[in-house]
Image (tube, grey):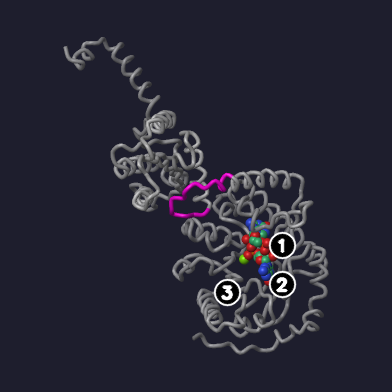
Amino acid sequence: MGWNSALENLPEQELEDELRRQMQAYGQRYDVQTGLLNYQSFLGALSKLIRARAGRREIALLWIDVLNLRREFALWGTKGTDALVAQVAEVLRHVVGPGALVGRFSARCFLVALEGAKLVKSDRRHIQQIADALGRVRAPGSRNKVETAAGVAFCPSDADSAEDLARFASLAASRSGYLKSSHVLAFRSGMNHHLMRDHLLEMEMHKALEQKHFSVFYQPEIELSTGRVLGAEALIRWNHPEPNYVTPSEFIPVAERSELIQGIVEFTLTTALRDAQRWRDMGLALPLIAVNTSWSNLRREDFAPAVRARLLEFPIAPTKLHLEVTESVLFDDEDLFAARVRQLKAIGARVAIDDFGTRYTGFNVLKRVALDTMKIDRCFIHGIDHSRDMRVLCQTIVAMARQLKLRTVAEGVEEPGELDALRQIGCDAAQGFLFQKPIPADEMTRFLREWPQRYRSAGFASCLEPAKVEAVG
Ligand code: C2E
Ligand code: MG
Ligand code: MG
């Protein structure tokens, strides 16, 4: 009697029990949704492969994180994500070829082990091809491509146990995610170090926020046609016992990768609004107060309502609040960004694009997003007085901003010559050490009082003379 007919002859209850038993056995070994090995059995199979490793053959472990799975879920629900995951699994099976192990570690994380992946070019290329093939996948019904962060670790050069290989490949993948690199990043021993430092920094930041060890400094923004103070940008400082322990450029990116950035922006926003209100009460009202935000804030649906709540708490005209976001957010999700800007404008706030020029944002993208201000990154300002090419470039940026009806602010002006060049170009405003380094609120009060006198005596008064605007070219 064949196996099938033996099953057919089983009483209904026993057949059902048998099916359940088999399903359980399958679930213990495989990821039910994709049919790929689950993590435990993948590790088991990888250990076996490592033990059986012949001679000098290497094993490469590729760790792939699908970064936009959560967003696809928010947009399309399980139907969308199931389809996407099924496609990812299918592409992986197809592209890795027979003999490779393919597994799933968690909802968004996939693993591939390849044997014979010597550190020769063709094998490296194959590893990159796997990641590239995934990058072309689109979920049915969605126009978004799969975004991945991938890392690779090798046995025996990086590790000789399955668990360590997986750990190191995941470290490399998370590093590649931070770098927003589309290349598969190979593990390096220094990565442990970086991540440990980030982790320690994150814990310290938690404590510092709780214990209020942060403060806000201000840097004035000067209008070039009048020389008056247009406003101030709020910049966070960590009051660490060790001077210059970490700069915002070091700790803000770490905070952005965790929930900490919410607390930081909340703190800066509240402090800046409170100080702006204080200056107004002293008769030193500022036309604008600029606060830096990040994509992790903007992405949240409750961001605009939270800003509105703060504006009600410290009543200054909403139009005075300028929220700055770096240019790179436009590359993350243009549609969502445009929607968030609309929401912020609906509550009256203004939005500025920070560090403009560091990524190339085309006209079309900028046209879609109703921004108010463009802050030109200081790398385009530094030395502008000595380079005609840079002047022409800056002039083109200003001309583009004009067409888009955006106000321009030059960042990082340090030299009088740079200031002159910016006036000739027709830039609207400037910030930089030439006028003032960022200072605590009390010093800013003094600055606001003394500035009219100071700019005359420091020879900035030429700012007030009509400037000749150069033609582009
Ligand atoms: P950013 O928003 O572009 O701020 C301008 C940075 O340039 C500030 O650095 C400022 O001190 C520096 N700077 C101003 N004038 C000059 C100059 O003439 N020469 C030079 N070399 N530098 C100048 P800072 O305060 O270290 O902040 C660095 C970045 O950290 C900021 O860049 C911003 O992206 C971020 N950041 C600072 N505070 C906050 C905050 O409260 N929240 C968030 N989300 N990000 C912040
Ligand atoms: Mg800024
Ligand atoms: Mg900037």
Ligand 1 within 8 Å of disc 2? The answer is yes
Instruction: Count every numbered label the image shows and give the total.
Output: 3
Viewer-proximal residue among 304 and 246: 246
Q: Is residue 199 visible?
A: yes
Residue at 63 percent across and 83 percent down: it is 423
Residue located beneath label 3 in the image = 380
x%, y% of residue 232? 71, 67
- Which residue position holds label 1? 316
**Residue flagged by tag 3: what amino acid is it?**
Phe
* Pick the front one: 407 or 28: 28
Residue 120 against residue 349 in the figure, above or below: above
Where is 227 relative to 13, above or below? below
The magenta stretch spans which residues?
Answer: 179-192
Q: Secondary structure at mark 3?
A: helix
Q: CA distance from mark 1 to mark 2?
A: 28 Å
- SS of the residue under disc 2: loop
